[in-house]
Amino acid sequence: MRQLNYSKPGFYIKLARFCGRANAVTDVKEVVAKILRAVNEQGNKAIIDYTAKLDRVKLKKSGLRVTREELNSAAKILTKDQRKAIKNAIHCVKEFHHKSLPQNWKRKNPHGGIVGETYYPINRVGVYIPGGIVPLVSTVIMTTTLARLARVPEIAVFTPPQSDGNVNSGVLAALAINGIEEVYRIGGVMAVGAMAYGTATIPAVDKIFGPGNAYVFEAKKQVYGIVGLDLLPGPSELMIIADITARADFIAADLLAQAEHGTGMENICLITNRKKLIEEVRAEIKTQLSDLNNKECIKTVLRDGTLSILVNNLDQAVEIANYVAPEHLELHVSKKYLNPLTKKIKNAGAIFMGENTPTVLGDFAAGPSHVLPTGRTARFMSGLRVTDFYRRSSITQYSRKSLLDAQPVVEAFSKLEQLDAHGRSMQIRFK
């Protein structure tokens, strides 16, 4: 765990380098562009060829789509506890996002004209569920539940095949329980290409959702404009602000949990005004790491993507948090500071308040979607919401009387902007 001191010169330069670590990967633009071009031109053939080359899985055109039988079979092999957990998580996500469902409205404006907004579910969306390193069953819930709540007519899910050509049974089971029927065993850039361009057997989508690795991230950027995109979530990030009341074992466990995602590009950070706590957390990490299943990928993150920052006070910690804009922000501080500190945080994907609120609650169960902005984009973007599955149209309707009230404004602007055809469009209605 590298350490920075807020009071030392060049602090923010070094912090900026750490924050940009995930963007400093080998340039993948050309590789991604080549695959996307092939999918656009050759469709299913390119998908099958690149899946064989990159994933070492041989697929047939008839086997690209997961069958209904496969979905139903996967759901049947779940244990009672697993089925209960998936249903509980879906329920919590629905409950949270139901409060954000947009409402159509109409009212009179100052001219007396009727104005309003109408919301429509996006007709067809594509959802990417990563599965290369670990099967993200929870991502199924955090994305498709919102699409279902928004009543999107067509939801197509894309997820990589395993080495045997099958899709992870847990992922399929969650999809089946959530009522998703259109699923493709296609991963990586090929999946993004299929969603954006379509093929002979796969209709293109209108908007793409879901996280992915550096290649998926870059592919989504390259097809933006052909299709809509969500918030381009990248490798996981966690920042913890801790004071004298914080427990080192809790902090270590939470840092290790996010390091476990496995891409090697995760960023985890501890900020505290207590130097001894940094030492205690380091010791706890070493102890807890010893019996974890994914210790090897965690070690990579501990070596390259872990940072501790020593500050003089919690206000400095808030300043740093608002600069970094972390995906997840945990506050391990005394109760009297918890609410005041939270109010000062302006930039964070998700805030977890108190030592009994670990980020894993957001990963799996609490309700807010775990698809969150990364790479400092929480400065201007928010986590995935149900409204992201809608598009909006404004509505305007004027009567002759309200049109007359608006006439002086329109004529003034048409003269200011030297657009006489605009002015005539209004004048002709009063001849």
Image (tube, rainbow, N blue to C red):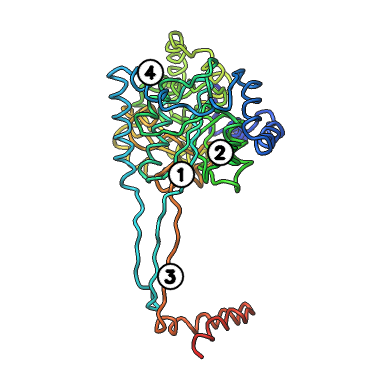
In front: label 3 or label 1: 3
Q: Earlier in the sequence, mark 4 or mark 3?
A: 4
Say the numbered circle drawn on residue 382.
1
Q: Dot 1 lies on which element?
A: loop
In the picture shown, does residue 112 fall above or below 81? below
Outermost residue to the front: 62
Q: Earlier in the sequence, mark 3 or mark 1?
A: 1
Residue type for callout 3: Thr
Of the pair 296 and 397, the residue shown nearer to us: 397
Residue type for callout 2: Met
Residue carrying label 3: 396
Label 4: how many Cα within 10 Å (few below 14, some 14–19, many 20+):
some
Residue type for callout 1: Ser
Mark 1–mark 2 CB contact (< 8 Å):
no
Instruction: State the separation of the CA atoms marked 1 and 2.
Output: 23 Å
Q: Dot 2 lies on which element?
A: helix
In the picture shown, does residue 42 fall above or below 107? above
Q: Position of residue 363 (x, y in %)?
A: 40, 29
Q: Position of residue 45 (x, y in %)?
A: 65, 29
Residue carrying label 2: 195
Instruction: Give left or right: position of 203 versus 393.
Output: right
Instruction: State the separation of the CA atoms marked 3 and 1.
Output: 29 Å
In front: label 4 or label 1: 1
Quarter of image, res 252? top left
Instruction: State the separation of the CA atoms marked 4 and 3.
Output: 58 Å
In front: label 1 or label 2: 2
Q: Dot 4 lies on which element?
A: helix
Instruction: State the separation of the CA atoms marked 2 and 4.
Output: 43 Å
For image coordinates 45% across by 15% down, the residue present is 285
Instruction: Give left or right: position of 343 versus 129.
Output: left
Of the pair 71 and 393, the residue shown nearer to us: 71
Q: Earlier in the sequence, mark 1 or mark 2?
A: 2
